[in-house]
Image: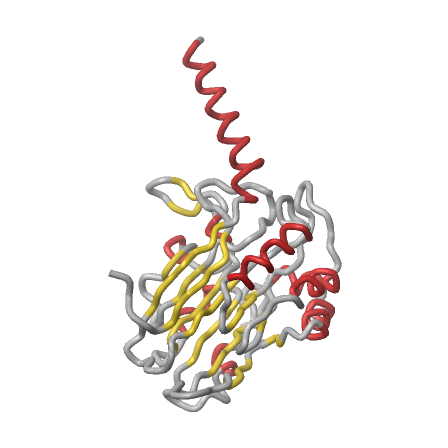
Amino acid sequence: MKRRLVLLLVILALAAWSIGFEPGWVQQRDLQLSPANWTGQPLRIAMASDLHVGAPHAGIDALRRLVDRINAARPDLILLPGDFVIQGIPGGETVAPERIAGELARLQAPLGVFATLGNHDWWHGGGDVRQALEDAGIRVLENSAVALPTTGDRQPLWLVGIGDDMTGHAQPATAFTSVPPGTASIVMMHDPANAPELPASTLVAFAGHTHGGQVRLPFFGALIVPGRSPRAHAYGWIPDAPAPTWVSAGIGTSTFPIRFNCPPEFVILQLGGKEPT
């Protein structure tokens, strides 16, 4: 009887943590990467994926705090690789893309703020999400690329955005069409399914979509991985990609407002400079 009571208490405690606390416990994930083919000045890149504004623990107030934290990190470049809205999550509240974009408009970075669309954005209609972001001064890259401004001794650098794989909008080859062959690039994509198709000249790539699985079990990893990516690609550095690719746990939740052993995060990556000892 006592064992059953203890087991029940443990289950209740884990449920309380997974539903009531961890989904709102947003971490700043600090990363360092010094590619051999990057000789320019160090860059600070901020990335926040899967905002899912309106999900429990991820409302407008939480978004406002996230924007403040990203700005406080003083990034040179900000990337937002998709899934700004939600659909049908228990306890969630629909938030209009215009309201979300209004908060994101406060993001500040010398090289700009860029986004791609995710599957939830396309399920919402796609066009209205894109319009709201662009009206807020956020450039949306869908299978396209842009040359980033260069100053001082900074070598040429391109930013590439790949469309969402789950909804059939990913066209990696098209995305790199305007990038000069062999030129260094940074890539953002909503879904890591396209990581195997990145060229070796990619300095670093960022993806979301998986939410890290939302629930990560010891010795097993992500309980569920949406899309085509294998479980090993659900979170962190993809071990076998042709270019360094970080898959983020994201900010919000979808399907169920639960996280366990997989807290929400935004990423601050320093590209170039000395590795920490």
| The image quarter in which residue 138 lies | bottom right
Q: Is residue 275 left or right of residue 247?
A: left
Which color scheme does this rendered protein use? secondary structure
Q: Residue at x 72, y 48 (%)?
A: 93
Q: Is residue 100 above or below residue 150?
A: above
Residue in front for this viewpoint, 76 or 127: 76
| The image quarter in which residue 39 lies | bottom left
- Residue 248: x and y, percent? 46, 58
- Can residue 110 be seen in this snapshot? yes
Q: Residue at x 49, y 26 (%)?
A: 11
In the rendered view of the protein, which quadrant contains the C terminus? Answer: bottom left
- Residue 18: x and y, percent? 52, 37
- Residue 45: x and y, percent? 46, 69
Q: Residue at x 68, y 41 (%)?
A: 91
Q: How many marks?
A: 0
Q: Residue at x 72, y 66 (%)?
A: 125
Q: Is residue 112 left or right of residue 194?
A: right
| The image quarter in which residue 31 lies | bottom left
Residue in front for this viewpoint, 105 or 23: 105
- Can residue 225 be seen in this snapshot? no
- Residue 53: x and y, percent? 66, 54
Q: Is residue 268 above or below residue 243?
A: above
Q: Is residue 245 left or right of residue 226?
A: left
